[in-house]
Amino acid sequence: MNLDKKLIDSLNGELKRQQNHIELIASENYVSEAVLIANGSIFTNKYCEGYPGKRYYGGCNFIDEVEQLGIETAKEIFEAEHVNIQPHSGSQANAAAYKAFLKPGDKVLAMGLKAGGHLSHGFSLNSSGEIYNFEFYGVSDKDYYIDYNEIKEKALSFMPKMIIAGASAYSREIDFKKFREIADQVGAYLMVDMAHIAGLVAAKEHQNPCLVADVVTTTTHKTLRGARGGMILCKKEYAKKVDSAVFPGIQGGPLENLIAGKTQALLEAKDISFKEYAKQVIKNAKTLAKVLIDNNFFVLTNGTDNHLINFDVKSTFNLTGKQAESILESIGIICNKELLPFDQESSVNTSGLRVGTAAMTTRGFKEEEFIKVGNIIVKALKKSVDIEILKKEVNELCLKFPIYENIRY
């Protein structure tokens, strides 16, 4: 049976959209064609509750081979003692980590949402905020960096059972060793959510949290450039409780076709070309940040150490993040509105934008291209150049760096 025509039209429409837009959403990337093949592979048909060698169904020998390969590869890359590759998403990895180490009502200290944290780090409408007792730390109102002294003071006052490091929108390197010191002072578990920076960690372009944290969670897409999903890495002593928290704790059968896609991406991350990619991601982000700063944009922390940049559009252009996102999308640049620290706007509108360089670096953009992208953003938000001219500039850049030329639906 062939694909339904409506599906074909939507798939080709999305393919064309991705080919013809500059993708600056910091949590997105382009996977290899090999990852796409693994994601849609024959493993889609197989149900396999349990873990390699300990399944609740028969016929899992090849499934076991792939999942174990993914586990061993992740352990090698991240120098982790134990890995669970089954979580369906980063949020479910977080939920499993909480379940493994906490009881309902236990105290947790995490980065607040406006400061750059994540919904699954205790937001009141998220299950994490409903089940556990969260307190939040932020960033300095002077330079927007994490204030480790403030975290220490809050930890000593709140006495949490767990401290969470890691962010969804923080552009500077995180000092996990300082978090470890604070956690030890109050007798707390240290959990790190490295979802955004996992690819940079894999390439040794960021401090490795697996060397100091009790448990580390991550997504497998973003900078790691794999199939969409989650993963948990932990010390060997916590392996049994983490595995039990994932299955049967929060989910049933794993999605082995996606695990195949995760495994392919992890294998790709071992290659020297991936290390060069990660270095270029950071170079590109620093280049883009400089263009924005040189054009009087208010860039938080005055730069970046990783793949993402947060900047204020309300104070600079009297635009909400929602309006600025719409303007850029109209010329073919995709990004997302972002709540900033101390933001007075709502989460629907926001005062800022978050952009990232991981996806377009995959397409081949280097510093020269990101200088052009930065200047296009400047002209678009200043409304100083006709929109059709900017659309043409975006299109020319995309045509120079094609993707998925061999794919048609």
Image (cartoon, grey):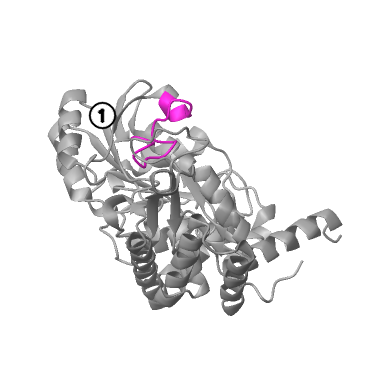
| The magenta stretch spans residue 106 | no
Give the dominant element type of the magenta stretch: helix, strand or loop.
loop
| The magenta stretch spans residue 128 | yes
The amino acid at mark 1 is Lys
- Give coordinates of residue 150: x percent, y percent: 18, 35
**Residue with the most extreme top position:** 105
Please tell me which residue lies in front, 391 or 188.
391
Identify the magenta region.
112-129
Residue 302 as seen in the image, left or right of residue 10 = left
Whether 244 is drawn above or below 379: the answer is above
- Give coordinates of residue 348: x percent, y percent: 53, 35
Which residue appears at 48% of the width and 26% of the height?
125
Please tell me which residue lies in front, 43 or 394.
394
Locate residue 74: give its quadrant: bottom left
Locate residue 117: give its quadrant: top left
Please tell me which residue lies in front, 195 or 143.
143
- Give coordinates of residue 395: x percent, y percent: 62, 71
Picture quarter with the N terminus? bottom right
Which residue position holds label 1?
161
Residue 51 appearing in the image:
no
Whether 167 is drawn above or below 295: the answer is above
Which residue appears at 38% of the width and 77% of the height?
272
User: Label 1 crowding class (10 Å Cα cut-off): few <14, some 14-19, many 20+?
Assistant: many
Under circle 1, the secondary element is: loop
Whether 179 is drawn above or below 397: the answer is above
- Give coordinates of residue 16: x percent, y percent: 69, 65
Residue 354 appearing in the image:
yes
**Residue with the most extreme bottom position:** 400
